[in-house]
Amino acid sequence: MTDQHTPTSHIPGPPVSRWWGCGPELRRDTLGFLLQCQSYGDVVKLPMGRVIELFLRQPDAAMYLLNHPADVKHVLVTNQDNYRKGPVPPVESRIFGQGVLHTEGDTHHAQRRLFLPFFHGNHVTTYSSLITDTARTRVAQWHDGMTIDIGQDMAHLTLSVIWRLLFGEDMRSDTGLIRDSISAGQRLIKLQYDSLLASLIPLWIPIPRHRRFTRGFNLIEKTIIQLIRDRQRSSEHRNDVLSLLLAAQDDDGHPLSEREIRDELMTFLLAGHETTANALTWTWLLLSQDQLVWERLVFELKGVLGDRLPDAADLPRLRYLKMIWDESLRLYPPAWSLHTRLAQGEDRLPSGAMLPLGSWALISPWSLHRNSRWFPDPSRFDPERFSDEATRARPVYAYIPFGAGGRRCLGESFAELEGLLILATIASKVRLRLDDGRTIHPRPGMTLHPKTPIQMTVQRVGLPKTYPVVA
């Protein structure tokens, strides 16, 4: 960090194409490129190229990757009013509409005020039995020696939980069809982020990728709208998000429109299960590769739970479980990149760099979490990084799996409760072993998911004879 003023023209960055900017490098190896950019300093200039400059009518259009926690805090918290969310691809707008994920200003604040009580505090803990019962049902379907696609199993599990939370009932539709639809949408979103041409082709043009997306998305949308109308006709009130939305009013005292309710439900459905499913999948992979960490976890679970299912009251005593969860989110943050922030005015960062009006601030938890300045030997799985002592020694904003500031993930408390309870429920019953020794690489889409399916073998667990010491 420096107190010296750094003009935009002097901010360092990697060599990129004059016409296409950093686009080709980001498309070729998004995650690797972000890590390579750490060598250029706290703020890295990533020109967008002449084509984007002409399209935006903005000379010297560039993103600025922020690699220092103090700058991250400044943009997301201290001076957040100077930044708004950058534009998103058409398919992302089509999916989420004006849900809380995409809105700005007073509308966004009003949405957060509406949902905050539902996803925080004592209200969240009432979901414990729903989560553990669903996890127990899932693990009861596994037998010793069975091979499972852990990513698919975790996605089905978290989708069942969020569906119940949103609609107060079990899913009527085929879970597999909904999952396939979500995957098609994710692929199209990533393509539109990577390619200006792809983002300019209207969705109504019936090319194969548009047909795949539209077919699945229409299924999900039709199901949600039907559930809204059924509930309106019955006037039934349940303790679920749909009833909350139907009873809500805008600032003028009017009920929310069907479109507004649909946008919020779609946002929570997709964002509320995909991120947690991916986090769980990566955690099982990491645990399968470290015998000592696994044994220490099983020892803790047995000591706290005995033979019963966990609940929210157990979590403060399951300290090592929480350390494992945090370390997994460090290595594989589902939200690997936050939505870009667009500067509304010139802004000097704590690092000394001056961001001009109209610049794009890029913040990547993936890059921050794998920076050796904050996490020595960053690619190594080590839950001890999240001991109280180690956590206090780090800058707070070096670790932001749920973002920060006014746009911090609304469902963070619920996601943590769900993730920890699912881990505790399943790990106390079975051990999951990777079928082979191949390396599993991450693929960045809307969330960070494995590039190939992770096949794991189910084995029943036993209590370690001694307390394992982790060096």
Image (cartoon, rainbow, N blue to C red):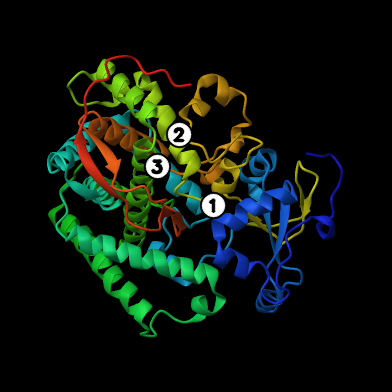
> Secondary structure under badge 2?
helix
Which quarter of the figure has residue 259?
bottom left
Which dot, 2 or 3, sits closer to the camera? 2
Residue in the picture at 72% in, 54% down: 44
Residue occupying image coordinates x 48% and y 31%: 382
Q: Which residue is mark 2?
A: 326
Amino acid type, mark 2: Asp
Q: Which mark is residue 348?
A: none
**How dense is the environment of label 1, judged by Cα within 10 Å: few (below 14), some, or many (20 and up)?**
many
Q: Residue at x 41, y 64 (%)?
A: 97
Q: Nearer the viewer, mark 3 or mark 1?
A: 1
The residue singled out by tag 3 in the image is 411
Q: Quadrant of residue 302?
A: top left
Amino acid of disc 1: Leu
The residue lying toward the viewer, choosing from 469 and 442, is: 469
In the rendered image, residue 244, in percent from the top left (x then y), is placed at 29, 46
Pointer 1 or 2: first along the chain = 2
CA distance for labels 3 and 1:
15 Å
Residue that appears at 62% across and 51% down: 35
Q: Is residue 95 above or below residue 447?
A: below
Q: Is residue 2 left or right of residue 180?
A: right
Indicate the position of residue 287 as horizontal and vertical percent values: 36, 36
Residue at disc 3, secondary structure: loop
Q: Position of residue 336 (x, y in %)?
A: 50, 50
**Callout 3: 10 Å neighbours few (<14), some, many (20+)?**
some
Circle 1 SS class: loop
Mark 2 vs 3, N-terminal side: 2
Q: Nearer the N terminus, badge 3 or badge 1?
A: 1
Query: Disc 1 designates what residue?
Result: 338
Q: On the rendered structure, is 268 left or right of 396?
A: left
- In the image, what residue type sits under mark 3? Gly
**Quadrant location of residue 51?**
bottom right
